[in-house]
Image: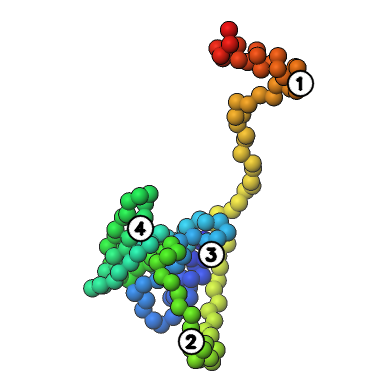
């Protein structure tokens, strides 16, 4: 997330355009960290609203809605801002054929970024310790039946 935020921030700063609103997805499909938007906003010194499902913009303010359980939270965020969105905020349109042809002819600006060494390093992964579910293997056949009777006596089902 740190490297992605830096790369996006570098591209935004390299562009001469002043952006009022920067939209990102809430989380990546690989790790679901949900950190890139927050890190980008911090880097650019802009307010951030995360996991937004609905938004309107008027008078230099984005009114953002986020679902929390069965409730909803509403935030008023002054622009310029960074907003991370959940799916469903916007349904993208397919471009028309003339639009696609025009897009092919447009130049693509490339910005090279200088990615710093990550400050976070994965030290290792371990599987969680499996806790006993309380189940006990009682064996098979007559042996299992005797063991089951003993357990039922212990818990007070049989006397």
Label located before the other in sequence (1 or 3): 3
Label whose residue precedes the other's in the sequence (4 or 3) = 3
- In front of the other: label 1 or label 2? 1
On the image, which quarter does residue 41 sit in? Answer: bottom left
Q: Earlier in the sequence, mark 2 or mark 4?
A: 4
Of tags 4 and 1, the one toward the viewer is 1
Residue that numbered label 2 is attached to: 96
Label 1: which residue? 141
> For mark 3, what is the residue?
3
Horizontal side of 21 relative to 108 (left or right) equals: left
Q: Which residue is mark 4?
A: 66
Alpha carbons under labels 2 and 4: distance apart: 32 Å
**Which sits in the foreground, 122 or 48?**
48
Which of the two residues, 138 or 30, is positioned nearer the viewer here?
138
The reply to whether residue 132 is in sight is yes
- C-beta proximity under 8 Å, tags 1 and 2: no
**Residue at the image point whose x is 53% and y is 79% from the top:** 111
- Residue 46 position in % (x across, y down): 35, 66
- The residue carrying pointer 3 sits among few (fewer than 14), some (14 to 19) or many (20 or more) residues within 10 Å by Cα, namely some
Vertical order, 90 against 143 (above or below): below
Quarter of the figure with residue 63? bottom left
């Amino acid at each position: 997330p740190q490297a992605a935020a830096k790369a996006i921030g570098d591209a935004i700063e390299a562009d001469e355009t002043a952006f009022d609103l920067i939209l990102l997805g809430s989380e990546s499909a690989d790790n679901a960290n949900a950190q890139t938007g927050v890190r980008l906003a911090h880097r650019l010194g802009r307010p951030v609203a995360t996991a937004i499902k609905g938004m309107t913009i008027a008078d230099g303010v984005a009114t953002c809605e986020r679902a929390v359980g069965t409730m909803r939270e509403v935030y008023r965020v002054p622009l310029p801002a960074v907003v991370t969105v959940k799916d469903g905020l916007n349904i993208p349109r397919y471009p028309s054929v003339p639009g696609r042809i025009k897009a092919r002819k447009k130049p693509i600006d490339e910005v090279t970024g200088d990615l710093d060494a990550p400050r976070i390093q994965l030290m290792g992964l371990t599987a969680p310790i499996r806790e006993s579910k309380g189940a006990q293997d009682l064996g098979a056949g007559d042996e299992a039946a005797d063991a089951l009777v003993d357990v039922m006596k212990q818990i007070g089902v049989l006397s």
